[in-house]
Image (cartoon, rainbow, N blue to C red):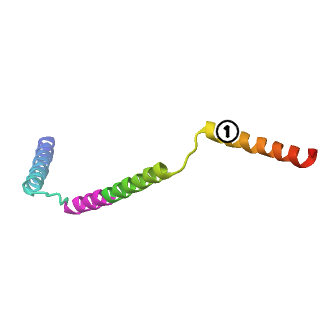
């Protein structure tokens, strides 16, 4: 009989523990846990504004660079070769005129 009483006491104890656990779970389930995302939203919005400013600045710099490149004076290769050859020929003619006479 003592074993039966011990078992029944253990069973009652376990049932009480189970009921306490169920009550705790019900309390947790009844609590509304809200996630406040306002801080995260403000950080994301600030990051987006910074990114837009950087993008705008980059576009302006690229526009200025393209304008400067269009204004830059670039000579074709054939013109540079012709100029160099003419300088050499003039140098040779001046040398011939000065030292051969």
Specify whether residue 48 is painted magenta: yes
The residues colored magenta run: 38-50
- Where does the image place residue 82, in percent across and percent down from the top left? 67, 39
**Frontmost residue, 40 versus 54:** 54
Image-based side of 13 in relation to 93, left or right? left
Q: Does 63 sit above or below residue 77?
A: below
Identify the residue at image location x=68%, y=43%: 83
Q: Residue 53 falls in which quadrant of the image?
A: bottom left
Image-based side of 73 in relation to 3, left or right? right
**Frontmost residue, 31 versus 44:** 44
Q: Secondary structure at mark 1?
A: helix
Identify the residue at image location x=74%, y=45%: 87
Specify whether residue 88 is painted magenta: no
Q: Residue 57 falls in which quadrant of the image?
A: bottom left
- Where does the image place residue 98, in percent across and percent down from the top left? 89, 49
Q: Which residue is mark 1?
A: 82
Which image quadrant: the N terminus?
top left
Image-based side of 1 in relation to 47, left or right? left
Q: Residue 80 falls in which quadrant of the image?
A: top right
> Dot 1: few (<14), some (14–19), or many (≥20) neighbours within 10 Å?
few
Mainly helix, strand or loop, the magenta region?
A: helix
- Where does the image place residue 88, in percent across and percent down from the top left? 77, 42
**Residue most extreme to the top:** 78
Identify the residue at image location x=14%, y=47%: 14
- Where does the image place residue 17, in percent across and percent down from the top left? 14, 51
């Amino acid at each position: 009989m003592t074993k039966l009483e011990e078992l029944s006491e253990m069973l009652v104890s376990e049932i009480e523990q189970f009921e306490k656990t169920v009550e705790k779970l019900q309390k947790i389930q009844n609590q509304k846990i809200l996630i406040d995302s306002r801080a995260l939203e403000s950080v994301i919005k600030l990051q987006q504004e910074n990114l837009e400013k950087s993008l705008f600045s980059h576009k302006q710099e690229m526009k200025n660079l393209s304008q400067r490149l269009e204004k830059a004076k670039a000579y074709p290769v054939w013109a540079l070769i012709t100029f160099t050859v003419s300088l050499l020929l003039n140098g040779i003619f001046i040398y011939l005129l000065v030292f051969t006479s």
